[in-house]
Image: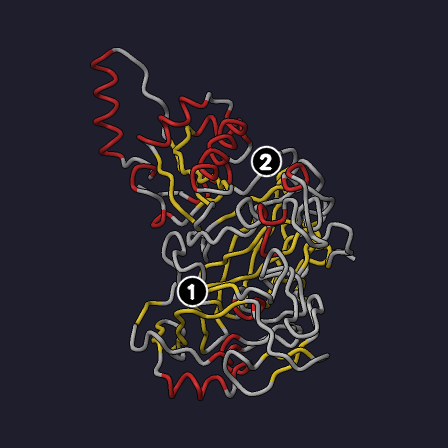
Amino acid sequence: MTRHIVQTTKMSWLLDPEEEMLGPVADGGTIIARTSPGCWGPMITPDYPSGHEVTHPVAVEGAEVGDAIALRIRGVNISSSATTSGTDVPLEGNFEGDPFVAKQCPGCGADNPSTYLSGTGPEAVRCRACDSPITPFQLENGYTMLFDSDRSMGVTVSAEVAEEIARSASAFSALPPESLQHSANLLAKADLPGVASVVRPMVGNIGSCPAVPIPSSHNAGDFGGFLVGAPHDYALTEEELSGRTDGHMDINGVTEGSVLIVPVKVQGGGIYIGDVHAMQGDGEIAGHTTDVSAEVTVDVNVLKGFAIDGPILLPRAGDVPPEARPLGAAEMRIATRLAQRGGFRLEEPCYPVAFVGSGATINEAADCALARIVEATGYDLGAVRNRCTIRGAVEIGRLPGVVTATVALPAAKLAEMGIWELVSEQYAGVE
């Protein structure tokens, strides 16, 4: 039965188009997703073949292959009171080919072994079959961050406080009852105490179900590349990887007040959400950041016949690169006078649209994003490069290979594409 509001209660590690989806939610309805931390918790939980735990995909009524779905992010509310993160080092002998997916016990050799917890620290996760410590990663330089009651500030703590948090790791993580991960807080890391940071929640992994089974952390061109020819059950070919939907973006502009347009590559779309970060600088240079549990509220609308290969972001007005922002009335008057003086026609007002691209490297990700602009607009590549340079920007979401290519497009072109209503609503009155 179609519902106007769907609250997610099931978690997934693998995005499989053959699995039954939750919902459906009505076109124009709302999904309320209760998410668990994205990276380090799943990374130290060998039981499951992914570096993320996300909400199970929700079908959207009327969404068919070749459509798109607009996700208006209405709220991102953090429930964790502490998190643990930092840079990683894979531990040889504890995985086969990919430490995020193909975790392996160094004692008995079991693949993705069932585990239990014993105490705190890096050896707390143990194989149920042979009792060997088993984590595929070592937290090289790590920190534990404590949040204030309003979730407005975070401060990294001392070793003593980190150990206290580790003893109640899951409670500080506020893991949803449906979560199956071990809380990263049990690692009790405190290599960077006393650093304060403003909380600015964003959603690192949000989108639609890929056309082929993909571990949720690998639904992107960079992480997904690890699956091509891999020596485990989740290996893909290059052609199969093109069925991804680039939901794992780690783009800090994907936050409350933004609009994300995602492709529909399977019947119903299959909207999933996870990997909320308390804050993240461009590039996520550490490889990981402050993963938290959260409640994310999104409104969904089907865009019939709007066939796209990857996500398109309409950031909040304040997050748009300066070069791409709509021109103010005074600026337009000056530009109009220049055009009239030269006897040529001024292009109508333009508005920002950010195309997501992914690939094995930043250059490949940028090429992917530019190709998606060419496909959506019909402009040639040279024109797209020029527009992105003088009326836009290319920004790094995540190293090694996710970017946004933002470009200001004329209202008539946006109407031709079928997204003028969304764009005009997002930037109404912005100068």
Q: Is residue 141 above or below residue 407?
A: below
Label 1 Cα neighbours within 10 Å, binned few <14 / some 14-19 / many ≥20: some
Of badges 2 and 1, the one in the foreground is 1
Q: Is residue 126 above or below residue 210?
A: below
Camera-side residue of 154 and 323:
154
Residue labelled with disc 1: 87
Q: In which quadrant of the rendered view does residue 149 lie?
A: bottom left
Question: Residue pushed farthest top?
Answer: 343
Residue labelled with disc 2: 308
Amino acid type, mark 2: Ile
Label 2 Cα neighbours within 10 Å, binned few <14 / some 14-19 / many ≥20: many
Residue pictured at 49% horizontal, 70% vertical: 138
Q: How many numbered markers are drawn? A: 2
Amino acid type, mark 1: Thr
**For the residue labelled by badge 1, is the local secondary structure a helix, a strand or a loop?**
strand
Residue pictured at 65% horizontal, 55% vertical: 215
Q: In which quadrant of the rendered view does residue 382 lie?
A: top left
Residue pictured at 56% horizontal, 61% vertical: 274
